[in-house]
Image (tube, grey):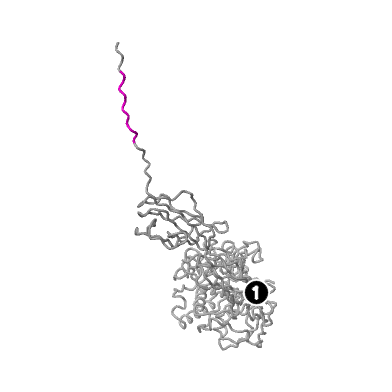
Amino acid sequence: MTAHFGRRLRKGAATTAVAAAAVAALSASQAPAATGGHRTLATGQTAPDGSDGSTGRSATGDSPYYTDLPPLSSPNPSPSQSPSIGTPVSVGEAEAGIPATVLDAYKKAEAELAESKPGCNLPWQLLAAIGKVESGQARGGQVDANGTTTSKILGPALDGNGFALIRDTDNGKYDGNSEYDQAVGPMQFIPSTWAWAGRDGNGDGVKDPNNVYDAALAAGHYLCRNDWNLSTDAGLRSAILSYNNSTDYLNTVLSWLEYYRKGTHSVPDGTGTLPSGRSDDGSGASPSPSPSPSTPATSTPSPSPSTPGDTTSPSPSAPATPTPTPTPTPTDTVAKLADAGTAKLTATAGDAFTKKISTRAQDSAGKGVAKVRIRFTIVGSTDATFAGGEKVAQAVTNASGVAVAPALQAGETTGDFTVRATLLGRTITGLDYTASVTPRVADTLARTSTTALTCTPGGEFADQVEVKATYGGAVADKVAATATLIKAADDATENDKGPYFKDADGKTVRTLTGLATDADGLLKLPKLYADDTTGTFLLRITTTGGATLTVELTVAAATDTSSPSPSASADPSPSASPSA
């Protein structure tokens, strides 16, 4: 059954007063920057830039949102530790915890936007703040291993009855409503906005508003449009108001943004805290306050299975119902990560690794654990990446508990680097794999011309030496090479006479290093010059991989090809004409 938002509250005087007072208290008690140094708009004022610029509506259609504010105490749990299931935690620690997959989606979206729209300066904490007020971090992380919510998260029908009037734009594809639109998914996009703003954040080829990776990336791009710079006061305010055009919404998001900036940590999926207060349901009731730090964590019953979206607090007279111990998730049962037969990871610079990393998640009995997420991170000074150019990748374990990382792509930096496998959602010892990038090589060198290389003493060779490198018959590009004028075929010592190259200052050089073949495997050497020594000389070119070519150079005096003048012969005197 589709889970809808539970009871919602009208944004009347009571809601406005509560939100404004709480934001003011938060700002005063935490730091001057608690609201990011932003000017708070007057109650009821709307921003001229609050629409999405395409539909004339906000991303959510100004749907209701959670109005709970963060605790006044700053969160400061150890970032490397997550509260254990059943272990009491303070309100601040509980609120600061973000479900592992949801948190990973926010950070991955931040990384993608840092590359595609660096001028936006999107912090993942802003996505977390919006995700908190829109869906309570996907209802406390109720997502599967791929990041898709276990049931749909839907806002109310936008039928104009206490809400905006937005008639159906998607034929009910996303919200199941063919009459009116409803906000959908953990980031609460209305279908008309998702139609152009949707993104595929988890690489499965589908843009699904119910998937936290897709929704977080779409939200990031939505907030970064119009060239807004989110590190500035104006840019941040405009972006948030475009998501939901409400001053109370702006103040609530800014409060959570500052709270998450002060510290957060990962908690297992499905164990995040759920907000209670909501805006605008037409009831006129005030939002339910967040529990105080002294309230036992077990005083609020879990939602009834028959109404999974209802987070209404129990009547004050109702007896407290102990929270049942949660059923362990697959992630909770993982005790160890082990290698699953990964072969030696070696590749030539610029090539793809032919082998992939395989990691097995095991429980305490050594049995494989399916449907848990493994993160693979490239560590060390290397330009190697996973396919697609990412330094971080994820994979879900199969029925045997094995997760296979995407293929690695070697860069130009040679040497060893590390790929670290870690479990998402719990802190257990990771597993490191060593990968090696070897230099590009060639096994054959050949001249591209058969013209003899000759020169007169003190002159320059008319032709430059050009060679082509191959490896296994294929072009060997970007292969390092060295060229040296040697003394003899059996003596590779640098010659001290005969032909030479010139450096940038015109000085004599007989060894060239740092050479490399081009994309076609070609290497053309600089011009050669000759001193006054005549004879036959040798130029030796070597490459990484052992390919060697020796080229013969000849310096000889010019041959005199002029012909001697023929001897002049006296013309015989003409015979005298006989007398008449």
Give the magenta part as a residue range.
565-575
Q: Is residue 153 visible?
A: no
Q: Is residue 474 visible?
A: yes
80 is higher (above) or lower (below) than 513? below
> Quick check: 50 left or right of 564?
right
> Quick check: 531 left or right of 190?
left
Count how many numbered circles sit on residues in the image. Answer: 1
> How far from the left and from the top, in percent, is residue 26?
48, 81
Amino acid under disc 1: Ala
Residue 2: quarter of image = bottom right
* SS type, badge 1: loop
Label 1 Cα crowd, 10 Å radius (few <14 / some 14-19 / many 20+) = some
Q: Nearer the viewer, residue 370 or 433?
A: 433
Determine the residue positioned at 45% across, 74% down.
38
Q: Nearer the viewer, residue 476 or 3?
A: 476
> How far from the left and from the top, in percent, is residue 343?
62, 71
Residue 169: quarter of image = bottom right
Q: Which residue is outermost to the top?
A: 580
Q: Nearer the viewer, residue 60 or 207?
A: 207
Residue 501: quarter of image = bottom left
144 is higher (above) or lower (below) than 478? below
The residue that disc 1 covers is 340
Q: Is residue 567 magenta?
A: yes
Name the quarter where the C terminus is drawn: top left
> How far from the left and from the top, in percent, is residue 523?
47, 56
Name the quarter where the N terminus is drawn: bottom right
> How far from the left and from the top, in percent, is residue 438?
53, 67
Q: Is residue 264 magenta?
A: no
103 is higher (above) or lower (below) than 462? below
Q: Give the main secondary structure of the magenta stretch.
A: loop
